[in-house]
Amino acid sequence: MARILVVDDEVSIVSVLATLLKAEGYDVVPMRDSQKALETLKADTFDLMLSDIRMSPVDGMELLRVARAEKPQMAVIMLTAFGTVETALEALKLGAFDYVTKPFKVDELLITVQRALEYKRALTENIDLKAQLVGKYQFDNIVAESTAMRNLCEMVRRVAPTDATVLICGESGTGKEVIAKAIHAHS
């Protein structure tokens, strides 16, 4: 179940969003105080944040900046009643997933939330798969008992971080693909 932080200084908007998202099965943390939301954002983990732009003492753009800096995998959707192209572009440049103007259509908002959460899942999965790939092709996982293989592993360590083109030759079944993937994983 996805955790969603909802931040808006209007009681009615927070209430509607919380009710709507809870009905969809999400774990919702509603907040009206943007300063408290900033502290909660730093201390807790969320999959998505829905935030109004115009609030005080901390505005939505500052919440977005903190979210990008401290929780880069968290998706952020910005809400505002004062929708302008400049504000939307600024929010998207700062890393917001999307921008929704108030009053919003419920179906469109729910689709945007669903897309943002799918994006977040794909991003997290991509990071996990890359970590597994790098772990799989560590030099420690290559069997290198002979002097020739140890020399080859040392050569791969030196070549991998460069922009050099590498041609790997050898008989079938000698591990050319393993070496190629090790170079790629460490490049």
Image: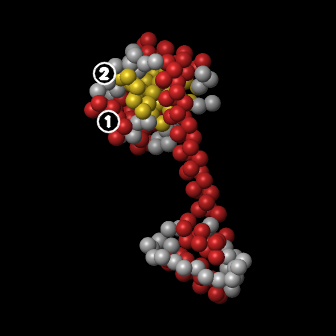
- In this rendering, the count of numbered labels is 2
Q: Position of residue 41 (x, y in %)?
A: 46, 33
The structure's colour scheme is: secondary structure
Residue carrying label 1: 89
Instruction: Determine whether, in the image, residue 90 is placed left or right of residue 117.
Output: left
Quick one: label 1, few (<14), some, or many (20+) residues within 10 Å?
some
Name the residue type under label 2: Phe
Q: Residue at x 35, y 35 (%)?
A: 91
User: As rendered, which of 40 and 2 lies closer to the eye?
Assistant: 2
| Secondary structure found at label 1 | helix
| Secondary structure found at label 2 | loop
Number of the label disc, if any, that sits on residue 142: none
User: As rendered, which of 28 and 114 lies closer to the eye?
Assistant: 114
Q: Position of residue 6 (x, y in %)?
A: 47, 24
> Going by the picture, which residue comes out furthest to the bottom?
147
| Rendering quarter of residue 181 | bottom right
Q: Quadrant of the N terminus?
A: top right
Q: Residue at x 45, y 76 (%)?
A: 164
Q: Residue at x 29, y 30 (%)?
A: 85
> Visible in this render: residue 43?
no
Number of the label disc, if any, that sits on residue 82: 2
Q: Residue at x 48, y 76 (%)?
A: 165
Q: Position of residue 31 (x, y in %)?
A: 46, 22
Q: Are marks 1 and 2 in contact (CB under 8 Å)?
A: no
- Mark 2 or mark 1, which is nearer the start of the sequence? 2
Name the residue type under label 1: Leu
User: As rendered, which of 47 and 116 lies closer to the eye?
Assistant: 116
Q: Position of residue 56 (x, y in %)?
A: 32, 23
Q: CA distance from mark 1 to mark 2?
A: 13 Å
> Visible in this render: residue 92?
yes
